[in-house]
Amino acid sequence: MIVKPKVSYRIIFLFLGMILMISCVPVKKLLYVNDIDELQEPIVNPREHKLIMPYDKLYIKVYSIDEKTNSLFSSSESMNSNSNSGMIGYQVDEAGNIYFPFVGKIHVGGMSTNESGVKLLEALNEYTAASSVIVKFIENNVSVLGEVQRQGNYTFSQDKISIYEALALGGGLSQYGNRKDVILIRQEGDKIIHHKLDLTDSRIAGKDFYYIQSNDVIIVEPMKLIRSNYGNNIFSLALSSISSLIAVILFVRVL
């Protein structure tokens, strides 16, 4: 006489439901801004001009109505070009100075690009007929690490980019990236500051660290449910084994 095991279908279905709940990631955790429908007023965040800091690299272009002056500075650019972008780059030293043809050492630290352009123009007019000077930032860098599509160090030419734009350089977050646990590492003076960012909170747009600065590091932490590919494989194997066991139990019960 074969004794059929007393297995409750309700328990089996409950167990299967728990497995499915564990193996699925809620859609809410995959969204960037979860409170978009709760916004009543625009978020204010004045986008201030980035000031020139030590170790920044500047693109400087001199324009003049005098062809000889244009030719002279075009030659200087060809001789001094050391930028990966192919543009002439002047490195700001630790004291905030650059060394420019004819002018020599000139202090630009703490100035905006417009202010430094005016200062350079005034200095150049003592030696040659310059009509305008354009100053721009080049080779600003941000490192994007962790659960993103493409980890790496990326270059941008804008004064500032937002945290979302910086993550887009790395292809955006992976399916395992925790949007509530993004770490921003920034050097402020002689201190290294760590900020924890929640990309699902719209109020991030009003924070100082919403805009990325050169040499920032962004680290996207993984979600707690899935920590590594190894963990995923173990979980899949366990789920498969449990499903097979349940199938065997159901088969025995039918006999």
Image (cartoon, rainbow, N blue to C red):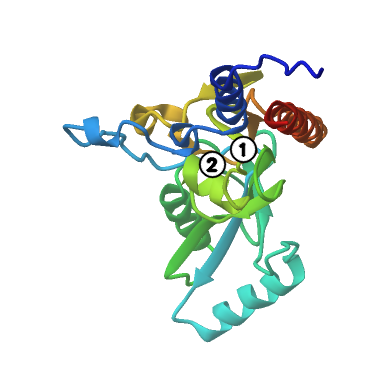
Q: Quadrant of the C terminus?
A: top right
**Residue 208 occupies quadrant:** top left
Left or right, 94 with respect to 164, comes to: right
Q: Which residue is painted at 17% across and 33% down in the image?
A: 41
Q: Which residue is mark 2?
A: 52
Q: Earlier in the sequence, mark 1 or mark 2?
A: 2
User: Is residue 55 visible from the viewing direction of this image?
Assistant: no
**Residue 192: percent from left, percent from top:** 65, 20
Left or right, 168 with respect to 226, comes to: left
Q: How many marks?
A: 2
Q: Is residue 198 above or below residue 72?
A: above
**Label 1 with label 2: CB-CB less than 8 Å:** yes
**In what element is the residue under mark 1?**
loop
Most distant residue in the bottom direction: 67
Q: Quadrant of the N terminus?
A: top right
Left or right, 29 with respect to 247, comes to: left
**Residue 186: percent from left, percent from top:** 61, 28
Between residues 45 and 255, which one lies in front from this camera angle? 255
Q: CA distance from mark 1 to mark 2?
A: 8 Å
**In what element is the residue under mark 2?**
loop
User: Is residue 39 visible from the viewing direction of this image?
Assistant: yes
Q: Is residue 135 above or below residue 191?
A: below
Q: Residues within 10 Å of mark 1 (few under 14, many from 20)?
A: some
- Which residue type carries mark 1? Gly
**Residue 177: percent from left, percent from top:** 61, 36
Between residues 29 and 111, which one lies in front from this camera angle? 29
- Foreground mark, 1 or 2? 2
Between residues 173 and 84, which one lies in front from this camera angle? 173
Q: Residues within 10 Å of mark 2 (few under 14, many from 20)?
A: many
Which disc number belongs to residue 96? 1
Q: Which residue is painted at 37% across and 39% down in the image?
A: 48
- Which residue type carries mark 2? Ile
